[in-house]
Amino acid sequence: MSGRLLKKVLKEQEEDQRIESDHEEEEEEAQQLNGKASINPFDLLNDDDHDLDHQEDESETFDEPSIVPQLKTKVGGVVSTSNQKSKKKKKKKGKEVSSSSSTSNVEKPLDAILESLSLDTPGKSADTKDCDNLGKPCAPSTLQVDPKFLNAENEMRRIFGSKVVRSFEKHERSGSSRMARGGRRSAYIPRKTILITPSEHWPRWDGSLSMEFLHVSEGYHHFRYVHSSSYRQAQSEFEAAKAIHDINAIASVLLYHPYHLDSLITVAEYYKFTGEHQMSAELISKCLYALECAWNPMFTPLQGNCQVKYSYETNKPLFTVLFTHMKNMDMRGCHRCALEVCKLLLSLDSDDPMGAMFCVDYFSLRSMEYAWLERFSEEYKSDNSLWLFPNFSYSLAICRSYLEKEEPSKDALVKTAKATSTDLMKQALMLHPSVLNKLVDKVPLKDKVWADILKNAFFRADQVGIPSLDHLINIYVERNSLIWRLPELQNLLRDAAQLVIERLRHNSSDKKDWACVRKEAFSSEKNEYAHLLVSDFASSAPSAPPEVLQHFMLDPRMRDAAQHPVGDPMEGGHAPRNVANRNTLAVLLESMLPWVHYGDGDGGVEEENQLNGHGAGND
């Protein structure tokens, strides 16, 4: 046999063996992929068949630890089927030799990646223990927010049905299309958010806000909002317009800075006072969209382990907007959504600057979350002192009455472990007797039996004499008066009040004992809750006539003054504007603004004529 023929035969045998080995390797890998129920994604890091560039691509996937397993299994499967032949031909011989060295080389960048995930800031101390627990929830589980209940549209579908909500959304889309008519429709799609659903015709997020991580304290991660230079410029323009009480100038700030929070809040308040509640709610939703777009990647508020303290000036709009959004959800009848927003407010600042503690019981009852309310009263802050507040003392009795109806089949031993609804209502009446007098007047309760109950000296007074307690009672009656319109709850209150009167006849010392409990629980002689306005907890939205809105103020404490007509302009109001010697068209356009006032009659014109020497005596 010639040498040329021998070489040809040997070459064909080598190719056959190589093809068979490739088929065997493919079958083995296919069996491994199909036979394993779960694959450890970090085992792929030890595969030395990937080149350096592919290792760099894989290291980038560690930026999102929560999706590493899914990405690794998919990427590993694709690489092993497409590039296995070319890479294994080159590196098959040296695979076993370099296996130990490859594992050590891969462990170093893995440790570096894991270390880069920690929040290393210049102002941070060497508290590594706190940093190791960054991903763990530190707040009570009762304050964890369920994101699926934050969508008001879903709750509206559950209440009214999909057809009604669909027709309403169709009407809204037609209105927005008419607004956009005449201009070129952009292809901008707003980013998805958790708190609200952004509208397509909203401006693009300008990135004027951001959030920075501060520190870790007692297991909580503290954050703060940061303003950009453009936002600070818009804030200075807003302050200048606020100083002269010009709502038109505040609205003009939004033309160039569409996501300036203070301007949006002020214009939303103005729309609310004029009765345009839908426009007001949309502006508040814009604020929520801007605040959420600025969230730090490590900010996880739904887990209840993040703090955004109200003491920082840049954080205050977040609490104002969330509280207003909660009230808007209440007006729409989305009480479960309002409950989740209330839980978010409580978790963001343990000091509760907005008084969400005095709303959480109301929304729990309206959304029929009775078991959650009992668990919350037992676990929150772990001191079991919530029942001393007027809202919790009465709401827990109502909650227990509904749970007794839902759990009739439980054993008697389980029932005796907790107090009955009647006992809880008696305790609430003994602790806060003035609530009954206010409820009879607010609900109102017009039966003769209530007049007989109020004749008793124990329920006759409508004030306790403790400023902070009286203020909280006013808040509770204003917030929860709608609940007491149910006949079954009125019967529970009536029976408990009659039992209290009967008990005091036989043992009058109980009255003094409960008075001592009130003084000990609310020992301060000052009103600690004076910053909470009773009007903020009302079920109905406030309104004001156009002639009052000319003095529209940003400070919420001016709302009470806005409920009364303005008297003499010299007593602090703005003087009426004059129309003499002015452009007619300008006066006509200005008169369409509801906050512009020209005075009564021709007083302003007569005064101008007297100044110009055209008095009435010249006739």
Image (cartoon, rainbow, N blue to C red):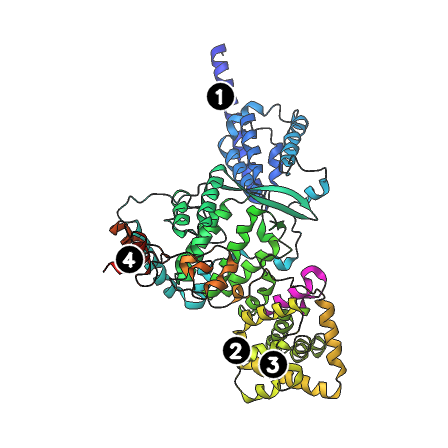
Q: Image quarter for residue 400?
A: bottom right
What residue range appears in magenta? Answer: 370-387
Which is in the foreground here, disc 1 or disc 4? 4
Amino acid type of disc 3?
Leu
Which is in the foreground here, disc 4 or disc 2? 4
Amino acid type of disc 4?
Gly
Please state the horizontal and vertical placement of residue 364, each as a whole percent of the image.
57, 67
The 10 Å Cα crowd at callout 4, few under 14, some 14 to 19, many 20 or more, is few
Residue appearing at x 67%, y 26% in the figure: 101
Q: Is 2 rendered above or below residue 563? A: above
Q: Is residue 605 left or right of residue 44?
A: left
The span from disc 3 to disc 1 (Cα, nearest Å) is 98 Å
Residues under numbered marks 4 and 2 in contact, where contact means CB atoms less than 8 Å apart: no
The span from disc 3 to disc 4 (Cα, nearest Å) is 70 Å
Check disc 2 and report the residue beneath it.
443
- Compare marks 1 and 2 and give the one earlier in the sequence: 1
Numbered badge on residue 265: none
- Compare marks 4 and 2 and give the one earlier in the sequence: 2
Residue appearing at x 39%, y 42% in the figure: 256
Q: Image quarter for residue 455?
A: bottom right
> Which residue occupies the foreground of this view, 301 or 435?
435
Q: Does the stretch in magenta take in 374? A: yes
Which secondary structure, mark 3? helix
> Which residue occupies the foreground of this view, 46 or 274?
274
- Compare marks 2 and 3 and give the one earlier in the sequence: 2
- Compare marks 1 and 4 and give the one earlier in the sequence: 1
The 10 Å Cα crowd at callout 1, few under 14, some 14 to 19, many 20 or more, is few
> Which residue occupies the foreground of this view, 391 or 166?
391
The 10 Å Cα crowd at callout 2, few under 14, some 14 to 19, many 20 or more, is some
